[in-house]
Amino acid sequence: MTEPANGIRYATLLDVESTGLDPNNDRTIEVAVTLFDVKHAQPAASMACLIKGPAENAAEAVNGIPAAMLPEGREADRVWAAVRWIIEPAQVIIAHNAAFDRQFCPDLGRPFICSEEDIKWPGRARGGSLVHLALSLGLGVASAHRAAADVDTLSRILTRLAELGHPLEPILIHAMRPKVMCISLARYEQKDIVKKHGFRWEDSNKTWWRRMPLEDTAALPFKVRVQG
């Protein structure tokens, strides 16, 4: 695995689209990546491709990919080989809701940064949706949810941050700090506060959880239990 021991010069911006939410039963049908030059805050190379498969897409209403197009996609092994070639110089991969994208990708040999959970965006604690983040920076969004559109939006957000005077490398290094699983111990009445601080509800065990740096838990307005 490539480690950012000497800093982060290049980052991979990645997004995938799938036929559903379960990696054990659903499949990846599209991937887009951009090799992003962190020093110059500009994209250096990009690709987006449909992945060949049966003409089935249960998530067509969400991602807008016609099922009829999928048999004409490219073979998965060739797509991922091209992805690895493009991202070879990168030290990290950035994805919005990285936990989802990561489970629909093969091992790409790079650590992931979640642009929704891990990055402390200037002026706000967390990113929220890509669309909301872009709009908050004065960027227009013409389309969303296709992989290439979302990667392009993330690329423009990073470029805009640099234009506003925020160096990108320290932001990304800060986002890569080691994290632990934290379970909220807040009362039920505090659920809106818990959610505001980035915790997610797990219905199976009725808990609010978030992976975060241990040192950041002291600033939370409620107590947590570190798990594992």
Image: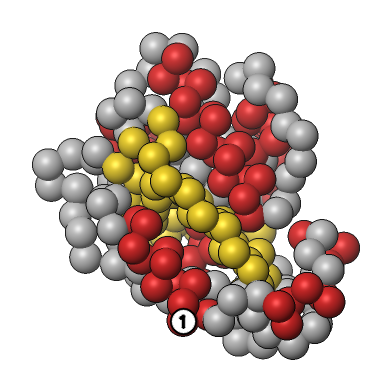
Q: Identify which residue, 56 or 188, lies in the foreground.
A: 56
Q: Amino acid at mark 1?
A: Asp
Q: If the image is split into quadrants, where does the C terminus sit?
A: bottom left
Describe residue 123's horizontal placement relative to residue 137 as left or right.
left
Vertical position of residue 89 compared to residue 159: above or below: below
Vertical position of residue 10 compared to residue 58: above or below: above
The residue lying at 63 percent from left, 30 percent from top is 133
The residue lying at 20 percent from left, 59 percent from top is 2
Vertical position of residue 66 compared to residue 88: above or below: below
**Residue 70 placement (x, y as % from top left):** 73, 77
- Where does label 1 land, which residue? 77
The residue lying at 57 percent from left, 46 percent from top is 151
Q: If the image is split into quadrants, where does the N terminus sit?
A: bottom left
The image quadrant that residue 9 belongs to is top left
**Residue 158 placement (x, y as % from top left):** 47, 30
Describe residue 84's horizontal placement relative to residue 118 as left or right.
left
